[in-house]
Image (spheres, rainbow, N blue to C red):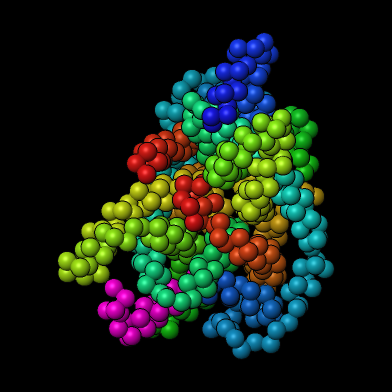
């Protein structure tokens, strides 16, 4: 195949890919660049692509007018604790499933998976009822619990594949030396699967950070998370595009950065471990 | 695995405490309790609520029991389940087909590329990780009459189109979905294409087939399991997709983009029918379970053959 590839064909393929890449990259570029334009310049026609003078006005606006730091902090706290609790629950569960259940392992795994597949929107109102009954409304705990519900099964499925790669002989050797299973998990299995576990953790964090449906219905003004701030910019005078783009950029850039760091694990995580990347 | 068996045999011979064989409970128990108990109670509430004519703000015990009436009617006011199901199906299959074709095309192109693969796959990761709510809101601007989409079209001398109108709202929803999730197909199919065995392709090329024939007769059949997995994963995401639709249209204009999750939300919040809304929710859950079942069966089959 390689010998038939004439040069112009390669160039054609390259141009085609660049076109597609532009299609996927340009809206992102426009979002980031618009956040540095003058507030009114971000929605003029024809749009300014490169010929604008960058300014930080929009960023000053969002930090002055809105408690953005609080929202950022809320999002971080909720996503952090949801991720932490999910991983603490999921790692032993997934390890126990792989090593201690032999006959019904797949059945148990799929049972967890079905829980993850419940659409959040269909549970959110019932969760709201229970939260108001338990007095959890307006607390961080409510969202943390909500995210944990959906993320534990996801984390179990993500980490399953990693534990399979640890050679069983290594664990047996430790058992022969009198180690307990918990010690083996902590001192052998987790260190060996560290890259995978870190990637899975980051994945769950990204998911919790981006989550909108639960956050929108289960928070009040003080516990509002970052993605739900979009309503702030829809005013009677129209949508404030400049500050909106600044908010979006601020919420998205760290996530894009982290995601690019772990991009090796991306494919496997997107398919619940069904495909190795 | 061996270790477990040896371990349990030993404990049977000795005076093993009961829970030694049930050691897995210690590991799986906490996760199990958290997910199942906490999911189970709201689920019960949805099922019980769906059997009542229950309105927002009233307690459950004051509302009348109507049996399966909610499930038989499945509409209230202007919100109807059938219409939403139709819209969801159009939105789902429309975006799925475009995403699959485009994703396959770009994935194949990427395998033909000799350098800068990493750069391009990095670019394709970006749309996937942007928070959907922000995707929705930014695209609301791009799709507006003086927005980016119309500007790009004008570069090709195509007149401006009202993307937010009721006839094109669903189409533009598909466009946004295609933008965000085609990279998902690209990345997975690209990974899949690289794991394919080389020998059959080389064999058919030696026999005189061209690149397209090699792709169509050899690579595509080998890739089919993966394609089906990606499609089912995507469908499951589409039927629960609330945030993008909510951020751009809130189901409007009128009910042009009233997909199933939006219908659930409207039934609760604007129609204030908790009973009917619970019925909608429950059917949505059943629907996703059904799709998941197909996925799981398929996954089991492919795992066995691999």
A15 inside magenta stretch: yes
Q: How many marks?
A: 0
Could you say which is closer to the camera, residue B296 or residue B19?
Answer: B19
Answer above or below: position of B221 versus B49. below
* Magenta part, dominant SS: helix
Residue B69's spot in the image, x, y percent? 45, 24
Instruction: Identify the image quadrant of the N terminus of chain A.
Output: bottom left
Residue B104's spot in the image, x, y percent? 36, 62
Residue at 36%, 67% (x, y): give it.
B108
Q: Quadrant of residue A119?
A: top right
Could you say which is closer to the camera, residue A156 or residue B101?
Answer: A156
Answer above or below: position of A44 versus A117. below
Kindly tell me whether residue A36 is visible in this rendering: yes
Answer above or below: position of A203 versus A46. above
Residue at 73%, 74% (x, y): give it.
A58
Could you say which is closer to the camera, residue A197 or residue B31?
Answer: A197
Residue at 47%, 72% (x, y): give it.
B117
Residue A145's spot in the image, x, y percent? 70, 38
Q: In the figure, is residue A140 to the left or right of B294? A: right
Residue B210's spot in the image, x, y percent? 21, 70
Instruction: Provide the residue span drawn in magenta.
Output: A1-24
A138 inside magenta stretch: no
Residue at 60%, 23% (x, y): give it.
B7
Q: In the figure, is residue A146 to the left or right of A160? A: right
Could you say which is closer to the camera, residue B282 or residue A195?
Answer: A195
Kindly tell me whether residue B130 is visible in this rendering: no
Q: In the figure, is residue B128 to the left or right of B107? A: right
């Amino acid at each position: 195949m390689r010998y038939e590839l004439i040069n112009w064909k390669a160039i054609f393929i390259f141009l085609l890919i660049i076109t597609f890449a532009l299609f996927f990259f340009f809206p992102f570029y426009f979002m980031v660049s618009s956040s540095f334009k003058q507030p009114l310049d971000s929605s003029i026609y024809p749009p300014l692509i490169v010929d604008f003078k960058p300014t930080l006005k929009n960023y000053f606006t969002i930090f002055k007018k809105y408690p953005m730091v609080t929202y950022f902090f809320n999002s971080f706290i909720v996503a952090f604790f949801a991720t932490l609790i999910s991983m603490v629950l999921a790692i032993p569960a997934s390890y126990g499933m792989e090593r201690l259940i032999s006959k019904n392992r797949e059945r148990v795994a799929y049972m967890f998976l079905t829980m993850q597949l419940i659409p959040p929107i269909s549970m959110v109102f019932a969760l709201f009822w229970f939260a108001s009954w338990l007095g959890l409304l307006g607390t961080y705990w409510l969202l943390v619990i909500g995210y944990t519900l959906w993320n534990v099964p996801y984390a179990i499925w993500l980490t399953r594949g990693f534990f399979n790669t640890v050679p069983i002989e290594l664990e047996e050797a430790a058992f022969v030396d009198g180690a307990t299973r918990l010690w083996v998990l902590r001192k052998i299995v987790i260190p060996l699967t560290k890259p995978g576990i870190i990637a899975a953790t980051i994945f769950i964090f990204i998911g919790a950070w981006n989550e909108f449906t639960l956050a929108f219905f289960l928070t009040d003004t003080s516990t509002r998370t970052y993605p739900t701030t979009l309503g702030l910019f829809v005013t009677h005078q129209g949508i404030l595009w400049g500050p909106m783009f600044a908010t979006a950029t601020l919420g998205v850039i760290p996530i894009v950065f982290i995601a690019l760091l772990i991009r090796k694990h991306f494919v496997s995580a997107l398919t619940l471990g069904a495909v190795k990347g | 695995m061996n270790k477990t068996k040896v371990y349990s045999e030993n404990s049977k011979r000795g005076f093993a405490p009961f829970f030694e064989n049930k050691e897995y409970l210690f590991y799986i128990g906490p996760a199990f309790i958290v997910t199942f108990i906490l999911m189970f109670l709201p689920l019960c509430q949805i099922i019980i609520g769906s059997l009542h004519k229950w309105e927002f703000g009233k307690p459950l015990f004051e509302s009348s029991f109507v049996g399966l009436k909610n499930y038989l009617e499945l509409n209230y006011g202007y919100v109807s389940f059938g219409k939403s199901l139709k819209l969801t199906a159009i939105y789902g299959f429309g975006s799925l087909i475009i995403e699959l074709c485009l994703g396959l095309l770009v994935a194949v192109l990427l395998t033909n590329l000799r350098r800068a693969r990493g750069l391009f796959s990095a670019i394709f990761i970006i749309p996937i990780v942007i928070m959907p709510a922000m995707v929705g809101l930014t695209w609301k601007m791009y799709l507006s009459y003086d927005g980016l989409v119309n500007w790009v079209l004008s570069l090709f001398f195509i007149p401006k189109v009202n993307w937010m109108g009721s006839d094109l709202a669903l189409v533009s929803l598909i466009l946004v979905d295609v933008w965000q999730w085609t990279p998902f197909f690209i990345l997975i199919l690209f990974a899949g294409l690289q794991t394919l065995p080389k020998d059959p392709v080389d064999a058919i090329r030696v026999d005189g087939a061209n690149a397209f024939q090699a792709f169509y007769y050899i690579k595509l059949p080998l890739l089919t399991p993966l394609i089906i997995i990606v499609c089912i994963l995507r469908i499951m995401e589409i039927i629960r997709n609330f945030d993008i639709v909510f951020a751009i249209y809130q189901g409007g204009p009128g009910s042009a983009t009233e997909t199933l999750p939006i219908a659930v939300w409207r039934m609760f919040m604007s129609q204030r029918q908790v009973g009917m809304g619970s019925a909608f929710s429950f059917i949505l859950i059943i629907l996703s379970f059904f799709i998941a079942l197909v996925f799981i069966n398929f996954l089991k089959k492919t795992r066995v053959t691999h």
